[in-house]
Image (spheres, rainbow, N blue to C red):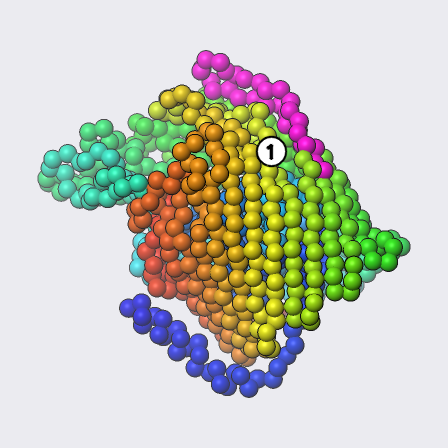
Amino acid sequence: MKRWWFFIFLMFFFTNIQLLYAEEKESRLEEIVVTATRTEKDIESVPGSVAVITKDDIEKRNIKSVDNALNTIAGVYNKSGKSFMETTSSISLRGIPDDKRTLFLLDGIAINDAYSGSVSYQLLSVEDIERIEVVKGPFSSLYGGYAMGGVVNVITKMSEKREFTLKTGYGSSWNRGEGLDDLRKVYLSYGDKFKDKFSLFASYGYRATNGYPTDFNVQSSKPTTGITGWSYTTDNKGNTRYLIGDKGDNRWWDDQLTLKARYDFTKETKLNLSFMRSRYEYNYDDPHTYLRNATGDPVWAYGTVRESSFLSGAGGRLQNTYNIGFETVFSSGKVKLSLGIMDREKSWYVTRGTTATRTGGPGTLSETPSQSYNADIQFTVPAFDRHILTFGGAFRHGWADTKEHNLTNWKDEDSKTTLSYQSKGKDRTYAIFVQDEIMILDNLTAYIGFRQDWWETYDGYANDVGKAGYPKKYTKRRASSFSPKAAIVYKPLEKTTLRTSIGKAFRPPTVYELYRTWTSSSGITYAGNPDLKPEMTTSWDLGIEQGLWKGAKIGITYFENYMKDLIYRKTVTSTYQELINAGKAESKGVEIDAEQRFDKWLRIFANFTYTDGKIKENIAKPSTVGKRLIQVPQRMFNLGAELEKGPLSTSFTGRYISKRFGNDDNSDTVNGVYTSYDPYFTADVKVSYKIMRNAAVSFSVDNIFDRDYWGYYKAPGRSWFADFTLRF
C-alpha cells in the first residue's frame, strides 16, 4: 500500500514537468536578513550559517506550529513526539540539546521563559509569520544568554495595504484513533494602512482536536491469573513489561490573538506596538483498559496496580506578550530601541493522586506563573571608510513562582485546598555589546565583537510544606560572562562564498534549576542548586557555499562545539539528588545543503547533517563519559520538492531522524515501545489550487507512508487536512 501512495504522488507531481519547463523565467530577488549581524544584510554576505523560512514556504506546507516550520533545516532537530500537542517539545541546533540552549526571538525580543528557559511554540498562529531566520553557531556576542546553539528569530507580518483573510479547515487521522482526530481550525485577519502613515494588523486563530491515545499504561507487574487482554512488551531498556491499557484520547485546543500597529513618522523613523495573547488547554477523555476478567468485564486494578495508573491529568497555559519598538536614523547612523514583556499569566497541570479513580479522588494542582522584561538599545554607525560599528546595551529581568495545592477532586482544578509546596526566584541581567564590521577588501569582510553580561539571581525560596528543613531562603548570587566572537566572509569568485567563525556563548541557570526542590511519592528528593554557574560553550565552524549552474547551489559546513559546566543531576544518597555543574561535552559534525531552482515554478532541495555529540566529563555520573548526548540524533536527512504553476501548487517533504537517547547512559536502546526514541522517516504532501483570484483550497497528507514510530509518546499516524482560504 505504501508503494502505491508513493507512485500516485510521483505521477501527480511530475505529469506536467515538460509544460512547466517552458514557462518564462523570472529572476529572484536578493534575500535580506537581520539576525546574524543585527543589521540588514544580503544572506550571501552574512558571517554565519543562516536559513530562512518565508511565509510562502509555510503556505506551501502543512505547517502546524513554529517549531514544525523548522523541520527541514539542516542542523535543526525538533523533539516533538505528538505534533503540536507536545508541551515539552524543544528545538536543538548543531548537537547542543534543548531549546533552553537556543535563543528564541519574537520580532527581536527574547521569548525563552523565566522559569525553565523553554519556549511556547503555540505563541502565535503560523499564518501571522512573515519569515523565520535561523542563525546557527554561538551568538552570545550579540544576544547574550541562551544563544549557545544559535538564534531563531520569528518575524511577524505587518500590513502595507488593506487586506482580509479567512481560513478554515478540517482533518483527521486516516485510521481513526491513530492521529489528530477531528482537527478543526479557523483563522481570521484584517490589515490596513492609512494615509501611508499608520499600519494596523489584527488576527485571531483557533484550533482543536479530539486527539488520540498518546500515553499508555505499561506495568512491570504481570496481571494475575484469570485476567486477559494484556500483551507482552518491554521498556526502552529491554526489561519485560505488560501493556494493560491507555490513558484516553489526548485532546487539545488553543487560540491566539494578535494586535499590531505601526506609525511611520518618516520613511526612516517608525514606532511599532504589538500585543499577543495565546492560550492552550489539554486533557484526556475516558481511559481504556485492555484487561478483562473471566466474565468479560473490564478490570481496572490487580495486585499492586491501581486504577489511578490509567489516569492522566489536564493542563494549560495563558500567555500575554507586549512589544514596543522604535527606530530612526540620525546623521549617517541608525538607532533601534526594543521593549518587551512576556507575561505567562497561567501555566498549570494536574497530577492525580495514587488513590484517585476515574470518577474523582485526590490530586495536585501545580501552577507556575512567570514574567520576563526585556529592554534593548542598538546603535549602528559607519566609522572611517571601511568600518560599520554596531553597539548597545540590554537588560532582562525575570521571575517565576511555583505553587502546588492539594485537590479534593483531581478532575476539577478549582477544588484546590491547602498549599503543599512552593518555590520561587528572580534573576536579572545587564549587558553591553559591540561589533565591528570591517571591509578589508571588496570581497573580504571581517566581523569582530564581544558582549559582557552581568547576571544575578535573588529572592530564592523553597518550601516543601511539613518537611524538615523547610522553608528555605537563598542568598543573592552574581556571575558574569564575556562572550567574544570573530568571523570572516570571503568571496574569491562571484558564486563562491567562504565563511569561518569562532566564538563563546553561555546560558545562565534557570529559576527551576536554582530553586525547584521537591520530593516524589517514592521518597526521593530532587533538589535545585542555588550555587549553579552558567553553562559555557566555545564553538567554531568553517563553510563554503558554491553556486553551480543556473539555479543550483551547494553548501558544506563543518562545526565543533566544546561545552563545559553543563548542569547534571547528581545522586548524593539513595533518597537525595541535586543539580550540579558537572559536565563537559563535545559535538562535532557537518551540514550539507543542496538546492536546484527551475526559475519560480520548481524547487528541489536536500540536506544532510551528521553530528557526533558525546559526554566528555561528568563527575555527577562518571559512567556516562563517552556516551552520546541525549536528544542528539547522529544523522538527519531532509529532501523535498515544491512545484507551482498558475493556480496549482504542490509540495513534498521527507525527513529522516536517526536513533536518539533519552537517558544519559544510553541504556534506552530498544525501539518500538512506549518511551523509546525510534529512528524514522516520514513524508508529507500538500496540494493547493486557487479556484478564483481571491479563493483557494488545499489538501494535505502528513506521514503519507503511515510510519509507525515512537518519540517517547506514540507519534501520529497518517492524517489528512483540507482547508479553504479567502483573501481580499
Which residue is situated farthest in the top direction here? 468
Image height check: is 456 above or below 131?
above
Quarter of the image with the C terminus is: bottom right
Say whether residue 256 is visible.
no
Q: Residue at x 62, y 20 (%)?
A: 475
The percent coordinates of residue 266 (x first, y second) are 83, 59
Q: Residue at x 70, y 62 (%)?
A: 490
The percent coordinates of residue 174 (x first, y second) are 33, 61
Q: Which residues are magenta?
A: 452-480
Please tell me whether mark 1 sits on a helix, a strand or a loop: loop
Say whether residue 19 is visible.
yes
Image height check: is 340 above or below 596?
above
The percent coordinates of residue 616 (x first, y second) are 48, 38
Front residue of 716 and 451:
451
**Amino acid beneath label 1:** Pro
Disc 1 crowd rating (10 Å Cα; few below 14, some 14-19, many 20+) is many
Residue 456 on the magenta span:
yes
Image height check: is 379 above or below 574?
below
Q: Which residue is mark 1?
A: 534
The percent coordinates of residue 143 (x first, y second) are 67, 44
Image height check: is 74 above or below 629?
below
